[in-house]
Image (cartoon, rainbow, N blue to C red):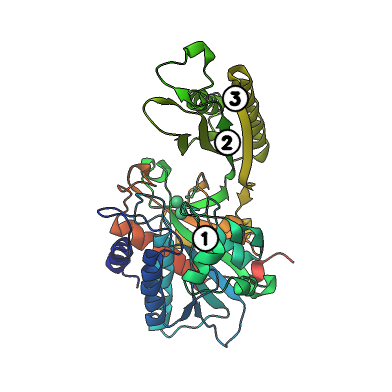
Amino acid sequence: MVEAARILQRCDALARHSELEGGLTRVYLSPEHRAASALVLGWMREAGMQAELDAIGNAVGRYEGRRPGLPCLMLGSHLDTVRDAGKYDGMLGVISAVECIDSLNSKKKRLPFAIEVIGFGDEEGMRFGTTLLGSRAVAGTFDKKVLDMKDSSGITLADALRGFGLDPARIPQVARKKHAVLAYAELHIEQGPVLEAEGLPVGVVTAINGFTRLKVLLSGEAGHAGTVPMSLRRDALAAAAECVLAVEMVTKNHPELVATVGRIEAKPGAINVIPGEAAFTVDVRAPRDALRNDAVQAVLSQIKGICEKRKIDLEVEPLQEFGVTACAPWLMQQLERAVAARNLPVRRLPSGAGHDGMAISAITDIAMLFVRCKGGISHHPLESITADDAAAGTGVLLNFIENFEAHAVPA
Ligand code: GLV
Ligand code: MN
Ligand code: MN
């Protein structure tokens, strides 16, 4: 039995740990992250798991199989949020997985494999400008150069980890050996409108779209807003504005392609000063790597042209890139069997959003189950799901776990 009411109550309980009053913002290695992790570790222990924080700040629970030390089926999602977030993106996947373990534990059921549930500390990348820190550490692809990256207050990742009571030198120990992980499965809200439009509570993910993220720095010349004639200006913010529209234009005629400027800053930032510097981010995503790469080249060439025309100096810093991550057909089949076993129609769909599975795919095959959300709204405080859908998704995940056949892994 899975308790849908408890799943939603736990999402509410986690949402109370927020730096934003009246809303939800919880960034990696913050006091709110510590409090949310403590709650999750407590729920894991109540569900019969051994649970602790690892060296990168992931909340990790382990439910042993028929004997200790067996390879694991890994489940999970993330506990960090975007700014002014909803309460289900990430958290639902962790809580529903713990609910499944609680159900197994209450039946005293042990399986021929262990199960690990991970509440990844950083998936959204809000604090250090780079994403998937928790899952990259687990996958062994954590690049220690990122320890020097700074947050907006100038605190390095290494110092933030130490401040959280963690030892950055121990991060390599977080990495799992390939043979110790049989597969990774993540339940997540859809964050899009497809399931709702088709009247379906769940969907099986086929692949996660790839992304490229860039930071663009424009330098012009600051000056007096009242005295410098328009024809003599090198206004970095006006150039950035033209670039933002060019980024949007690149997606025209490609319905699968999306591109976003999510952040922009101008300096010195005064009403009567021409902006001498501007910086903005670009996030380009597509279900095909060639389409995304072509779009990134088009974005760069447009920005270069705009800067030449306006005599603006240009610097582009690549931030992060992930190719399309396919879900494994053998796991999709097992998830589909679990969907059908609950008398639900089987619907396959791609993921436009990024997920921890992108990093975890470096060590094992991955699968994802989407749960319908209202209006396709996500990364927004109005993100919402129903108790019935939480129950349906968690029921499918439990059926998948109980019938998981690791031997289906191709040799
Ligand atoms: C994570 O939510 C992302 O897709 O940006
Ligand atoms: Mn998100
Ligand atoms: Mn997410």
Mark 1: amino acid: Leu
Kindly indicate the quadrant of the structure image that contains residue 390. bottom left
Q: Is residue 283 above or below residue 31?
A: above
Mark 2: amino acid: Val
Residue 213, horizontal then vertical, whole percent: 58, 42
Residue 48, horizontal then vertical, whole percent: 42, 83
Which quadrant of the figure contains the C terminus?
bottom right
To which residue does mark 1 refer? 335
> For the point 68% across and 70% down, which residue is it?
178
In whole angstroms, how far apart are the C-alphas of marks 1 and 3? Answer: 52 Å
Mark 3: amino acid: Ile
Residue 98 bears which disc, if any? none
Q: Earlier in the sequence, mark 2 or mark 1?
A: 2
Which residue of the protein is positioned furthest toward the left in this rendering? Answer: 22
Q: How busy is the neighbourhood of tag 1: few (under 14 within 10 Å), some, or many (20 plus)?
A: many
Q: How busy is the neighbourhood of tag 2: few (under 14 within 10 Å), some, or many (20 plus)?
A: many
Report if the CB atoms under discs 1 and 3 are less than 8 Å apart: no
Give SS at disc 2: strand
Which quadrant of the figure contains the N terminus?
bottom left
The answer to whether residue 299 shows anywhere in this view is: no
Query: On the picture, is 20 further left or further right than 128?
Result: left
The answer to whether residue 39 shows anywhere in this view is: yes
To which residue does mark 2 refer? 216
* Disc 2 versus disc 1: nearer the observer: 2
Q: How busy is the neighbourhood of tag 3: few (under 14 within 10 Å), some, or many (20 plus)?
A: many
Query: On the picture, is 189 further left or further right than 13?
Result: right
Residue 312 bears which disc, if any? 3
